[in-house]
Amino acid sequence: MSYQEDGETVDGLGDMFPVGFHILLVYQLPHAIISIRYRMPRAKLFLLQEPEVPPSPKATFVNYDRKPERLNDSEHDTRSRSWQTVVIRLVGSHPLWGHYLWNAAKSFATYLDVHSNSLCKGKAVLELGAGGGLPGLVCALNGAKQVMLTDYPDHSLIENLKYNVEMNVSSEHQHAVRVMGYLWGKPVEPLLVTIDETDGVKRKSDLIILSDLIFNHSQHDALLDTCDEALSTDACNVSTPSEPGTPCVLVFYSHHRPRYVEKDLEFFRKARDRGWLCEKIVEESMEVMFPEDSGDENIRGTVYGWRLSRNPI
């Protein structure tokens, strides 16, 4: 920009802020901060050293240990009995909260492990907003035919998911786990999986995993759009508390902000309006993740699990 002073044009680099008889301009360039202090009638230029940028937080590792009674369960095959701990690497920091292993994911993992015969073994599984991928990895370790782990198409999130697959799934079974970036509500064709390589038929998911996602209130419709399109339309197996049937969507979450409980639950009201049957299947008390936050700790520390299935016509 420029302005007139005593009939002479004075050029500047940007917005100027008068302080008394001074005009101060501050600009940040890639390797320096330039401060221009203009005092009539001449300008002086000062180069200031750029402040040191703090290093990015390092990745962290969290272990999920399987319940002891599951280690030698004779009802499950050798592949399902062989694992004891899942080591989840989390990105150091991320605006989409991918640097936490949420309580819902831990509760989800246990539920899937306990009910792996009906929910995992031989199934096509899709996890949306996977973060570290713990629930989906438990499905893979318990004999799922195909697992698709998805999250926002950000390089750090996707590469971290791939790392967790490589670290926790044996090389002979890694072909059954795919990782990709996906935006909720977009076309689902990339999410379809080929179960039988001989026929090449793309198949929708028997199980869709939503772990601590519904606090994203603006994304409820997009999440439901994807579930509508990506879940198998096969007839649902008979579902009981001990043997939950598929195809279904499982939604685990906590009310992290108690004042928004009703907004969280709007997800299920919208699902019912679309014809989904919604039933609560889990209510588990856990230690709150953020003790310094406001709101009832009993509410914030509880994990809820819901099962969504299609309403028979």
Image: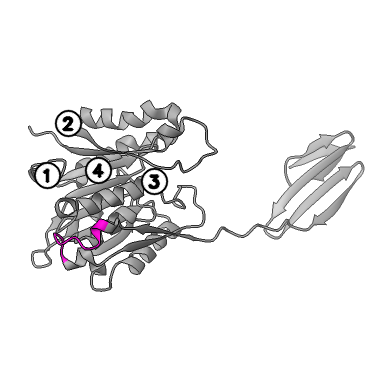
Query: Whole-percent x and y of residue 29?
Result: 69, 55
Pointer 2 local density, CA inside 10 Å: few below 14, some 14–19, many at least 20: some
Residue at 7% x, 43% y is: 235
> Can you identify the residue that label 2 sits on?
275
Q: CA distance from mark 2 to mark 3?
A: 29 Å
Q: Residue furthest right?
A: 41
- The quadrant in which residue 10 appears is top right
Q: Secondary structure at mark 3?
A: helix
Q: CA distance from mark 4 to mark 3?
A: 15 Å
Query: Whole-percent x and y of residue 252?
Result: 31, 42
Chain-order first, disc 4 or disc 1: 1
- The quadrant in which residue 216 appears is top left
The magenta span reads 69-77
Chain-order first, disc 4 or disc 3: 3
Query: Whole-percent x and y of residue 48?
Result: 80, 56
Locate the C terminus by quadrant.
top left
Q: Amino acid at mark 4?
A: Leu
Between circles 1 and 3, the one closer to the viewer is: 3
Q: Is residue 71 magenta?
A: yes
Residue at 9% x, 46% y is: 234
> Can you identify the residue that label 3 sits on?
103
**Left or right of 302 in this view: 20:** right
| Position of 20 relative to 83 (above/below) | above
Does any portion of residue 265 appear in the rendered image? yes
